Amino acid sequence: MNADPVRDSRRLETLTQRLLGVFYGVYNELGYGFLESVYDEAFAIALAEAGISHRRQVSLPVLFRGLPVGYFKADFVVEEAIVVELKSVQEIDKAHISQLLNYLRASKLELGFIMNFGPEAHFRRFAFSNSRKGNLRHLRSSAAPNQHPGRAGPSAPEAHPSS
């Protein structure tokens, strides 16, 4: 993000509107009843057609004291600014909300959406400021490894993303 919070806010607001336009466009065209994987594929196509940069099935580390202890896979990271989790369920429930909040808590991203292709198109927006994330306090800008008592240095887990 830029150093100008007003510019960042406007950028995210504009991006949010474009993202919601893509979501509702996919829903209006496909309707309800497909597997999540169908909506995932259609959403990626629609994002590309809208000129919105994105990455799919993004493996991001969960950090503990500055070290990776696991990984999660976000359905989409849009414009390197927003996590998007797609669902195709009757309704968004607490488990889906917890999943997205954990994604935000574990990453440097501060904005996320759950977009549900259920009987009715429905989304939930969540913001989680990096200043409130305890796991990011241990991040250091230096390249020196973190030293922990009884350890020679950090050992990152093998990159075996789990869903």
Image (tube, helix red, strand yellow):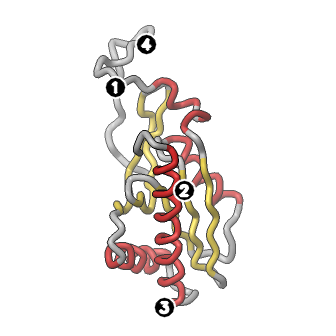
Residue positioned 51% across, 41% down in the render = 106
> Mark 3 or 1 closer to N-term?
3
Vertical comparison of 114 with 111: above or below? below
| Residue where numbered disc 4 is placed | 148
| Residue where numbered disc 2 is placed | 112
Vertical comparison of 152 with 88: above or below? above
Most foreground residue, 130 or 63: 130
Residue positioned 28% across, 22% down in the render = 143
- Regarding residue 163, the answer to whether it shows in the image is no
Residue positioned 60% across, 45% down in the render = 128
Under circle 3, the secondary element is: helix
| Mark 4 vs mark 1, CA separation in Å | 11 Å
Q: Position of residue 42 (x, y in %)?
A: 40, 80
Vertical comparison of 49 with 129: above or below? below
Q: Does residue 119 appear to the left or right of 50 in the view shown?
A: right
> Mark 4 or 1 closer to N-term?
4
Under circle 2, the secondary element is: strand
Amino acid under disc 1: Ser
| Mark 2 vs mark 4, CA separation in Å | 33 Å
> Mark 3 or 2 closer to N-term?
3
| Residue where numbered disc 1 is placed | 155
Amino acid under disc 2: Gly
| Residue where numbered disc 3 is placed | 29
